[in-house]
């Protein structure tokens, strides 16, 4: 018979008449509280593989001439099931025994020992009762048992001694009653996530994720990267959750089972979910040149971002094959096409995303050879304050001798503010309130209602003063032949502060090829204009990767010009300073003046 630990003992005495079968008896009640906990030693009650435990019940009749006895066990039927009776009332006199039997939440057994019956080893007779945990009951505590020893006769002490009580190894007096037994139950198992599908999604969230595993329970908190989420279709092995928005990177899903209070691992590899930033579509920032004849065959350099190294390119809807393709640049050849505007569209095969189908920076104008289609080749300057009032010069061809209209950002410029020739138009910008810098399209329509290509003018927000702006001190050289390969060094400060990368350099509306880009010096090839009839000044704009910019002026010389340049000495550390360099040009004198402005974005 197994030994039990006596944890607590209190005195309870209940006496009342009870009819049990053929015998009227006197009843003494013994209440045992079975507490589930890890045992202090090997003598504690243990569950078997089926979560069952056994109670051995004994009636000691040794030395008694004649006795009839019943033993009743009451149990908490909400937590336990009576399973089996082991060896029913083992070792009682074979012809005089009965039990065990179960009725409701009571198990009874009993026997009589007739006078002259042999004692078995002079000890008591016992039976084994086995109980199992109810389905769905985990770690039951304070399970109540009531043990009743029922003896023949009307006096409780006539045939009962300290050695013939239930569980004689506890040896409590008949009047003693509350017994706490300790039994071992294996600890509950924590939730375990075995897979999540899918295991990644965008930082925007809203991805439906199926979580599979064990021991989830049907209730309890679920967190997704530390954010509480509400699962749907939750079972002990599966549930579906929706990812909340989160920064890019790895996070973990954690499931808590409210029944056991246990949670899955907070850094379980199987529960890891990766947030990825949404892919960015290709963006075309310039095409050079922006026009060509309807015959096609024009080599066009396309510059921008997120092109990828593979994917389709269309030119006015016709597929073309790029050369020298990188993530930021490629060269394509224009196919033949009718006169008019078309767009170049780039698709990145890795992300599946495509540049805008009507992006102004990707617009290419087909012109009929010898036609009078107007073409804007330069805008100077190409930015100014949102308040307007900036005098802007457009240069190009086929504007016509009769004034047409100038449109900027969808607004038609007042005719009184426009001066017009066939190759040059000067106009004053209207006000255009912006929040931050904003590039708008500038185009013209001839008096014959023929539209030109568009160029970009940037309105600047004068309400937000920028600091740490790029500052061009001077260009070296600051002029060169329009049809020659001229390397220009742009000298200044804050071209590449920490956190920025290489930006862009434009001469008017033409993007220059960058040879090197450092914080105090940028080297570029000045875009070639070819044969021009006379010298012309272009605004040189450097734009950092963060959008901040500065400008200077470069003089394109007609091929017949022979003048040289000298490098002016820049003013150092003088806000709103003015400096001038003096140099000879075609035997004359000219001043190159650069006014350092406070810039806005």
Image (cartoon, rainbow, N blue to C red):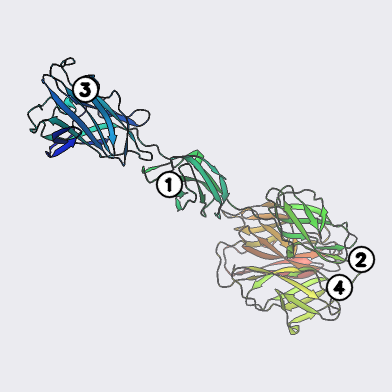
Residue neighbourhood size for the residue with mark 4, other residues' Cα within 10 Å, grouped as few (<14), some (14–19), many (≥20): some
Is residue 120 or residue 441 the one in the foreground? 120
Quadrant housing residue 98: top left
Quadrant housing residue 537: bottom right
Task: Identify the disc placed on residue 398.
Answer: 4
Question: Which tag is nearer the camera, tag 1 or tag 4?
Answer: 1
> Tag 2 or tag 1, which sits nearer the N-term?
1
- Residue 288 lies, with reference to residue 164, above or below; the image says below
> At which x and y percent is residue 50?
37, 30
Residue neighbourhood size for the residue with mark 3, other residues' Cα within 10 Å, grouped as few (<14), some (14–19), many (≥20): few
Question: Which tag is nearer the camera, tag 2 or tag 4?
Answer: 2
Q: Are marks 1 and 4 in contact (CB under 8 Å)?
A: no
Which residue is denoted by mark 3 in the rendering? Answer: 96
Q: Are marks 2 and 4 in contact (CB under 8 Å)?
A: no
Q: Quick one: SS at disc 4?
A: loop
> At which x and y percent is residue 429?
69, 77
> Tag 4 or tag 1, which sits nearer the N-term?
1
Question: Which tag is nearer the camera, tag 1 or tag 2?
Answer: 1
Residue neighbourhood size for the residue with mark 1, other residues' Cα within 10 Å, grouped as few (<14), some (14–19), many (≥20): some
> At which x and y percent is residue 46?
30, 28
Question: Which tag is nearer the camera, tag 3 or tag 1?
Answer: 3
Quadrant housing residue 488: bottom right
Which residue is denoted by mark 2 in the rendering? Answer: 369
Q: CA distance from mark 3 to mark 1?
A: 51 Å
Which residue is denoted by mark 1 in the rendering? Answer: 218
Q: CA distance from mark 1 to mark 2?
A: 77 Å
Instruction: Classify residue 540 as left or right of residue 588.
Output: left
Q: Quick one: SS at disc 3?
A: loop
> Tag 3 or tag 2, which sits nearer the N-term?
3
Task: Identify the disc placed on residue 132.
Answer: none
Question: Which tag is nearer the camera, tag 2 or tag 3?
Answer: 3
Q: CA distance from mark 2 to mark 4?
A: 12 Å
């Amino acid at each position: 018979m197994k030994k039990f630990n006596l944890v607590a003992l209190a005195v309870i005495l209940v006496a009342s008449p009870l009819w049990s079968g053929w015998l009227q008896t006197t009843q003494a009640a013994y209440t045992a509280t079975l507490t589930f906990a890890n045992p202090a030693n090997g003598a504690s009650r243990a569950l078997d593989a089926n979560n069952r435990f056994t109670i051995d019940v004994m009636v000691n009749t040794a030395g008694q001439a004649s006795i009839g006895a019943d033993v009743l066990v009451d149990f908490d039927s909400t937590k336990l099931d009576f399973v089996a009776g082991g060896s029913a009332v083992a070792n009682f006199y074979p012809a005089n025994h009965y039990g065990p039997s179960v009725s409701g939440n009571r198990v009874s057994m009993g026997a009589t020992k007739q006078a002259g019956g042999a004692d078995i080893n002079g000890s008591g007779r016992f039976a084994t009762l086995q109980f199992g945990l109810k389905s769905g009951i985990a770690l039951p505590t304070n399970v109540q048992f009531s043990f009743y020893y029922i003896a023949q006769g009307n006096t409780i002490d006539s045939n009962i001694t300290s050695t013939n009580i239930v569980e004689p190894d506890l040896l409590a007096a008949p009047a003693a009653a509350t017994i706490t037994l300790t039994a071992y139950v294996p600890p509950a198992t924590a939730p375990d996530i075995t897979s999540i599908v899918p295991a990644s999604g965008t930082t925007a969230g809203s991805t439906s994720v199926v979580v599979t595993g064990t021991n989830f329970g049907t209730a309890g908190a679920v967190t997704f990267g530390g954010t509480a989420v509400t699962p749907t279709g939750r079972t002990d092995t599966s549930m579906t959750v929706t990812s909340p928005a989160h920064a890019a990177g790895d996070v973990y899903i954690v499931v808590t089972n409210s029944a056991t209070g246990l949670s899955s691992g907070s850094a379980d590899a199987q529960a890891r979910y990766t947030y990825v930033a949404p892919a960015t579509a290709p963006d075309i920032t310039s095409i050079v040149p922006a026009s060509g004849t309807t015959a096609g065959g024009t080599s066009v350099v396309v510059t921008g971002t997120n092109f990828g190294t593979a994917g389709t390119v269309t030119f006015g809807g016709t597929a073309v094959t790029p050369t020298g393709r990188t993530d930021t640049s490629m060269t394509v050849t224009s196919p033949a096409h009718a006169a008019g505007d078309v767009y170049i569209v780039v698709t990145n095969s890795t992300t599946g995303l495509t540049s805008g189908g009507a992006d102004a920076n990707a617009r290419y104008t087909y012109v009929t050879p010898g036609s009078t289609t107007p073409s804007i080749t330069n805008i100077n300057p190409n930015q100014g304050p949102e308040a307007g009032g900036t005098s802007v010069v457009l240069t190009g061809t086929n504007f016509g001798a009769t004034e047409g209209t100038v449109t900027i950002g969808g607004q038609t410029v007042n005719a009184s503010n426009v001066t017009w020739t066939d190759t040059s138009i000067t106009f004053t910008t209207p006000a255009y309130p912006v929040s931050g810098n904003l590039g708008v399209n500038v185009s013209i329509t001839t008096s014959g209602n023929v539209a030109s290509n568009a160029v970009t003018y940037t309105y600047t927000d004068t309400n937000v003063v920028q600091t740490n702006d790029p500052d061009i001190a001077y260009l070296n050289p600051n002029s060169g032949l329009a049809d020659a390969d001229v390397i220009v060094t742009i000298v200044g400060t804050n071209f590449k502060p920490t956190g920025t990368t290489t930006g862009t350099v434009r001469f008017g509306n033409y993007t220059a090829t960058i040879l090197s880009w450092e914080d105090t010096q940028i080297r570029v090839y000045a875009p070639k204009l070819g044969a021009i009839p006379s010298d012309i000044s272009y605004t040189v704009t450097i734009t950092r990767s963060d959008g901040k910019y500065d400008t200077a002026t470069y003089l394109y010389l007609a091929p017949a010009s022979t003048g040289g340049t000298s490098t002016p000495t820049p003013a150092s550390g003088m806000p709103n300073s003015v400096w001038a360099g003096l140099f000879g040009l075609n035997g004359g004198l000219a001043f190159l003046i650069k006014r350092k402005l406070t810039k806005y974005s």
